[in-house]
Amino acid sequence: MKKTRIALIGCGNIGRFHLEHFKQMPEVELVGVCDLIIEKAEVFAKEMNCPAFKDYKEMLDAVSPEAVFIGIPPYCHGEIEFTLIERKIHMFVQKPVGLDRKLILDINDKIRESGIITASGLQLRYETTVPVLKDFASRHKIVSSSFVRIGRVPQIEWWRDRSKSGGQLVEQAIHQVDMMRYVLDDEAEEVFSFGSHDIIKDMPGFDVEDMSVSAIRFKKGTLATFTVGCYATGNEPSENKMIFGATDARADYFMLERLKVYGDKVEAQAENDSAEVVKGDGRIISSGNATIYQPSGDCGLVCDKTFIKAIQTGDPSIIKSPYEDAIKSVFLTLACNESMVTGKPVKVDLDF
């Protein structure tokens, strides 16, 4: 099978994330990289022996990629996606795919019309313990679920501006929000959120919530909470994890580290044969009344490889988080943001 010609827009941290994957993907040829700060693009270009560009349209004209990976800040989405759709170029859009509901829906409508293949950077769906977790949730009625994500403020200027990042729940914890939707195989119908601005006082330009707590009601009856904070100054404020609780069993998911299942002794399932799998040394360990599943491989690499495989085979069904599904996680986080501002419960509108 011939190599798929790909290009990269955005040569920051997330661009580096994808670049390291491209180095492990003989099925692709990186034909161009682009960044508004040309020096960043030139660093990537030198590593991959491809041209660097400051203008993405100039890059598209010059190298004619079949697919583009978009790794830009949340507030920058729009024009790039419409251009790729018009040119019928497949696209991988990093999370969150945007901050404006109307813009996101307009992009989604154009994607539907064009028939291009899309994927998003919600790579936890490809982590090797997740089929075990989804199976657990399918066999037990999950009555309560929660996640906690506490960290530091990223050293990125635009991240501190809520109008540009959407805040921590939208920009970072969307991974956990998406995982809850995916594992429960359900959608939220209503949220109520509190946001704090009382912890971080002396950071210039900082106007996002330093902590938020959200209560969510899912359509099948699960009640959930999201607790998110960027106030940490050390490593000990909280243990970042997700909990899925049934009346007779419980699963604790520690992102990219381990899955602990209590009261349920089913063996780990085989990995999904319909998608690419990067092998590793995942193990199953018995510890008292818990079974511990350790992940293997690099789920981000699997996510990128699956997107390319979908293009090469013409089978988008193997992609676990296409654009049209990823926007549902964005809309859930935006509903939480709206509730923080209004102080009222907000219905999650997924009617599109």
Image (cartoon, helix red, strand yellow):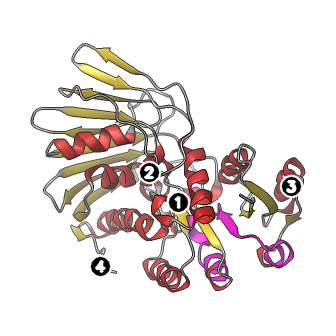
The Cα–Cα distance between marks 3 and 2, rounded to whole angstroms, is: 29 Å
Q: Which mark is residue 45?
A: 3
Which one is in front, 90 or 172? 90
Q: Quadrant of residue 325?
A: bottom left
- How far across and how far down the image is residue 134, in percent? 30, 44
Say whether disc 1 or disc 2 marks the residue closer to the N-terminus: 1
Any part of residue 195 in sight: yes
Up/down of 190 relative to 84, above or below:
above
Q: Which mark is residue 52?
A: none
Q: Which residue is mark 4?
A: 351
| Furthest residue toward top | 288
Say whether disc 3 or disc 1 marks the residue closer to the N-terminus: 3
Which segment did they paint magenta? 58-84
The Cα–Cα distance between marks 1 and 4, rounded to whole angstroms, is: 21 Å
Residue, x 54% and y 47% (percent of image)? 276
- How far across and how far down the image is residue 27, in percent? 71, 53
> Is 73 covered by the magenta stretch?
yes
The Cα–Cα distance between marks 4 and 2, rounded to whole angstroms, is: 22 Å
Q: Which residue is mark 1?
A: 95
Residue, x 39% and y 48% (percent of image)? 176
